[in-house]
Image (cartoon, rainbow, N blue to C red):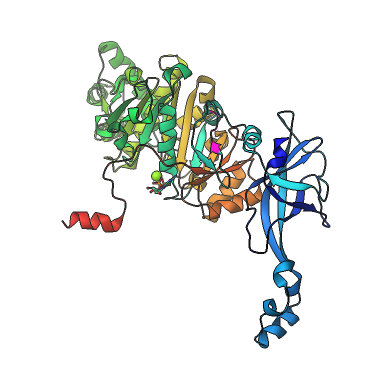
Amino acid sequence: MDEVSLQRLGTVVSTDKGPNVMEFSFVTEGGANDIVTRRGEFVSVVTDSGTVIARVQDLVQTNRYYQQAEAVREYQSRGEPLRSIFPTDRWQYTIARARVLGLWSDEKRLRPYFAVSPGAVVRRTDDDVLSSFLSLDVDDGLLLGKLSNHDLEFTPNMTRLLSKHLAILAMSGAGKSYFVSVLLEEILSRPKDKGRLAVVVIDVHGEYTYLKNVDFTSLGITDDVEVEHIRGSHFQIATRSLSAEALASFVSDMSTVQQRDLRRVLTEIQQDSKEGYSLIDIMDYVREDETISKNTKDALLGWLMNLENTNLFGKEASPQTESVIRPGKLTLIDLSDFISLRKKQIVVANLVSELLFKRRQGRIPPFLIVLEEAHQFCPESRQEIALPKSRIETIAREGRKFFALLCLVSQRPVKLSTTVLSQCTNQAILRCTNPYDLEHIGRSSEGIDKSSLEAITTLEVGEALFVGEAVSVPSFVKIRKRHLNPEGETRDLLRAIQKADK
Ligand SMILES: Nc1ncnc2c1ncn2[C@@H]1O[C@H](COP(=O)(O)OP(=O)(O)O)[C@@H](O)[C@H]1O
Ligand SMILES: [Mg+2]
């Protein structure tokens, strides 16, 4: 068996707690200062019933020469290091504590049902075994990076990663947007014959605009990738597509009486103007309607004027989603010109519900919406009424049936709606140190154990913990470098001031 030729890491020892079914400890091979095994690494023990796969949780160094504090102090005060008198190095060893993740037997993952034997040899896990054990898709998966501590490419299956929504959570600067760029490269470079998704990125900061100028053919793909960049200021919602309820949802506190009056006005105007109308037209109708009370009139006119001032409404919709959302195409909705959060929320609310509606009717292909700053659009707290919240919750609950998929990105997980978060079957969690955010992540994601949660605070920039359906056990991954980069971007303060001072 070639597994036997894998590097030996150590030998299982008997302790007062184990080995038991879920845990074992082993003494690592090598001398006092060799690092043979690392925390987080996958290790295995080959048995007659299959390969037991475990992860190193912790490493403890021991040395009996240093067990007696008094003796150590004594030699210390004499100015003689113990090392010079006794062969301390020979008595130093490392014990690794490993948590069992599963049993790999006949190409299947089984729940562990026995404890490994003391004395058993612990080896590095074979890459092929590990890849199958984690359910990676070597031939067709998305190449997102490498498994931390291993030289194994991380290639989750696209369907399992995206088909039940994905959440990307981390503090700011941890590499969320960078990871999204890598994900986009992978999704967009899929060959047509393998099936391509349509992707819509709601780009709150204009971070992805560079993608419209890059050369996708440099990725070695043969099929054309189309990128369309739509500025928020060019975005227009067709007034006639809005019901009284939809208009009411854009303003706060519209009473049922006011909504009823508005509904009647809309029915009238719809009969009169077949080719569409504007908010100003609705206002004219409201003004001329004699059955509406003065108070209601004033309130309705105020709200409509307020909406008109956003410049987001018009006779025709722009863009026409049917012509924009296409397989293998990336549509960037660039909201970086908008300062007002409300305007961004109106755009997102409208886009999300329109896309789901049209997808349900089969008028647009399966798509993925990437939503940056997701907590601004579907917040947890009830005080912060965010218009798009209920619509994002709807797509989160129902979208998967129609392949209307979400990828939510947030640096404040604690502020993100739990309803939405719990619908995201996959989560990629990058570095995060805020205890409240960590607690929220721990609660909303079943797959995370305590030790993985702790490890999130120690992740490097660009390193992520994947939990969910895409991987069979929570896995740490170093996200790869992106192939396509923004040109002449300066993130470095020193270079930016030098450039400005030329
Ligand atoms: N996988 C990675 N490889 C290399 N550099 C990365 C990686 N992820 C992030 N970075 C670096 O960290 C910076 C911040 O990442 P970014 O994605 O903008 O963070 P966030 O969106 O979480 O605030 C990036 O500009 C990039 O320089
Ligand atoms: Mg970002």
Expressed as whole percent of the image width and height from the top left, the position of residue 499 reads 21, 54
As drawn, which residue projects farthest toward the left?
Answer: 502
Q: Position of residue 275 (x, y in %)?
A: 25, 13
In depth, the one of 501 and 230 nearer the eye is 501
Residue 132: name its quadrant.
top right
Q: Quadrant of residue 297?
A: top left
Measured along the vertical axis of the image, is residue 173 above or below residue 260?
below
Identity of the residue drawn at 76% across and 52% down: 11
| Secondary structure mostly taken by the magenta-highlighted segment of the chain | loop
156 falls in the magenta region: yes
Q: Which residues are magenta?
A: 153-157
Foreground residue, 420 or 89?
Answer: 89
Q: Is residue 294 visible?
A: no
| Residue in the picture at 35% in, 17% down | 322
Q: Nearer the viewer, residue 432 or 134?
A: 134
Residue 286 drawn at (x, y percent): 27, 24
Q: Quadrant of the N terminus?
A: top right
Tell me if I can see residue 84 in this picture: yes
